[in-house]
């Protein structure tokens, strides 16, 4: 007695199943991304060829608690071992959908690899959890490129910031603008206190300068100017304004449309203040020349009864005209005597140190003042300081109050014994300094009674 079973159906089904298995395995092995899977018990069941190449090891049906140690898995820093709960495949097995988790594989042989892993749990149609699968991508070369780019950007930033200038990067297409910390700190702001946008920059520009600055930007973007250059004022956090020299260069697309401008901000407040002070000194001199000319015109119209005095006035007029020419020469060549003093202690007038001079000062005072830089006023002009201590007090007070002051008819005795009168104009400068512009007025003062 026995049984009989036909196999004419089983054999073709088995052959089709084998073909499907081979096809799927070939498909997985030809993928550039690694594919790793496990069953619902957390045992590894699938490692395609790319996964084996990335890990440097074949499939080993081990449980989840051994995955990190066996396959040398580390966190993104490459030094900290990857905890089981952070392994992308284990996270997917717990029901999480994982996207672009970055980890490092350090095989026993070969170089470390940085990989991105994305995965999901495997759920049957009836809702049963069958396991989990992840796809892994080798991004080692990309990470190296990003690192090199970061180093290059850092070198670029250090090179530019080493100049002490602020930097800006304006995306003209999106109107976004990056302003460096140095740029904001120059104006007294913290990084978060100024919005990184074109509007954030525009709101700090002095309203009276906006039109001129906009015209310079427009001219550069039209390529009428090869480089963007502008001088304007920007508001500081304390409400004051600083003068800024802005320079920039734009990148255009293939259609000639501007897409990006990169440039720098330089604080030129001191230079501007010096220029304005020199302009003011020039105006003062011009006013004095005009006043002298008016006096001469009055002298010319004196009555015939004052012929003798008129002749004397004419003689004086020639002297004054020569003086006027001298003043004009001084204006054009900045030949006023100028000395700059620094106060080391605003509580005492005894610590005024010479920090700068000009050739006119040396010529007027007949001294090689450039050899005296760094010395105290009391050491350079001991007799003058002893006779006129109030002058030192005035200079220190000008630094304290930041208000300029004119001092007329200051007597000064030259080493050979001649006493002359000087007119001083003292004005405050940054960093506890005071400038003194002076001229010898001995001739003018001695002839003043004649004009009267």
Image: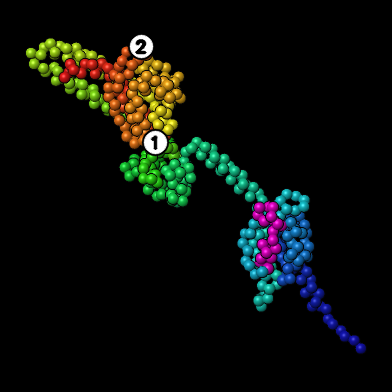
Magenta span has 83? yes
Tell me the quadrant of the picture where the C terminus can be found.
top left
- Colour pattern of the rendering: rainbow
Residue of label 1: 269
Q: Which residues are magenta?
A: 73-93
Magenta span has 134? no
> How far across and down, in percent of the image, does residue 241 sit?
37, 41
> How far across and down, in percent of the image, does residue 329 sit?
31, 19
Q: Quadrant of residue 420?
A: top left
SS category of the residue bearing label 1: helix
Q: CA distance from mark 1 to mark 2?
A: 42 Å
| Residue sticking out furthest to the bottom | 1
Point 44% across, 50% down: residue: 193
Point 43% across, 27% down: residue: 353
Residue of label 2: 416
268 versus 254 height, above or below: above
Point 34% across, 12% down: residue: 417
Q: Quadrant of residue 316?
A: top left
Point 66% across, 65% down: residue: 91
Q: How many neighbours does mark 1 have within 10 angstroms: few (below 14), some (14-19), or many (20 or more)?
A: some
116 versus 240 height, above or below: below
> How far across and down, in percent of the image, does residue 335 sit?
34, 21
């Amino acid at each position: 007695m026995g049984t009989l079973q036909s196999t004419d159906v089983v054999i073709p089904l088995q052959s089709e199943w084998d073909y499907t298995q081979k096809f799927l395995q070939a498909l997985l092995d030809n993928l550039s991304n690694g594919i790793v899977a496990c069953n619902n018990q957390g045992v590894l069941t699938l490692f395609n060829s790319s996964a084996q190449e990335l890990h440097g090891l074949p499939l080993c049906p081990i449980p989840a608690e051994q995955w990190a140690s066996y396959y040398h898995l580390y966190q993104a820093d490459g030094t900290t071992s990857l905890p089981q709960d952070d392994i992308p495949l284990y996270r997917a097995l717990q029901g999480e959908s994982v996207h672009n988790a970055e980890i490092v594989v350090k095989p026993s042989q070969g170089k470390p690899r940085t990989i991105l892993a994305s995965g999901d749990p495997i759920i049957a149609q009836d809702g049963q959890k069958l396991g989990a699968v992840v796809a892994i991508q080798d991004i080692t070369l990309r990470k190296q490129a990003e690192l090199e780019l970061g180093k290059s950007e850092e070198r670029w930033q250090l090179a530019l910031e080493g100049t002490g200038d602020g930097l800006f990067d304006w995306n003209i297409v999106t109107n976004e603008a990056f302003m460096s910390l140095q740029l904001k700190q120059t104006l007294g702001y913290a990084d978060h206190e100024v919005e990184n946008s074109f509007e954030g920059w525009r709101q700090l520009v002095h309203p009276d300068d906006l039109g001129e600055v906009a015209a310079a930007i427009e001219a550069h973007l039209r390529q009428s100017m090869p480089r963007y250059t502008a001088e304007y004022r920007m508001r500081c956090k304390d409400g004051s304004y600083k003068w800024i020299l802005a320079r920039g260069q734009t990148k255009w697309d293939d259609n000639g449309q501007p897409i990006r401008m990169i440039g720098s901000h330089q604080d030129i407040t001191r230079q501007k203040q010096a220029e304005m002070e020199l302009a003011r000194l020039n105006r003062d001199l011009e006013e004095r020349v005009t006043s002298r000319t008016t006096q001469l015109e009055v002298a010319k119209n004196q009555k015939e009864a004052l012929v003798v005095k008129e002749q004397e006035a004419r003689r004086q007029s020639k002297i004054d005209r020569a003086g006027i020419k001298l003043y004009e020469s001084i204006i054009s060549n900045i030949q006023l005597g100028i000395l700059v003093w620094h106060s080391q202690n605003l509580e005492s007038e005894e610590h005024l140190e010479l920090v700068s001079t000009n050739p006119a000062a040396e010529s007027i005072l007949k001294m090689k003042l450039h050899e005296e830089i760094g010395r105290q006023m009391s050491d350079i002009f001991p007799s003058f300081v002893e006779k006129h201590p109030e002058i030192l007090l005035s200079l220190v007070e000008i630094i304290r109050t930041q208000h300029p002051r004119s001092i007329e008819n200051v007597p000064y005795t030259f080493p050979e014994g001649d006493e002359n009168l000087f007119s001083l104009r003292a004005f405050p400068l940054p960093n506890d300094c005071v400038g003194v512009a002076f001229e010898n007025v001995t001739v003018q003062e001695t002839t003043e009674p004649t004009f009267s």
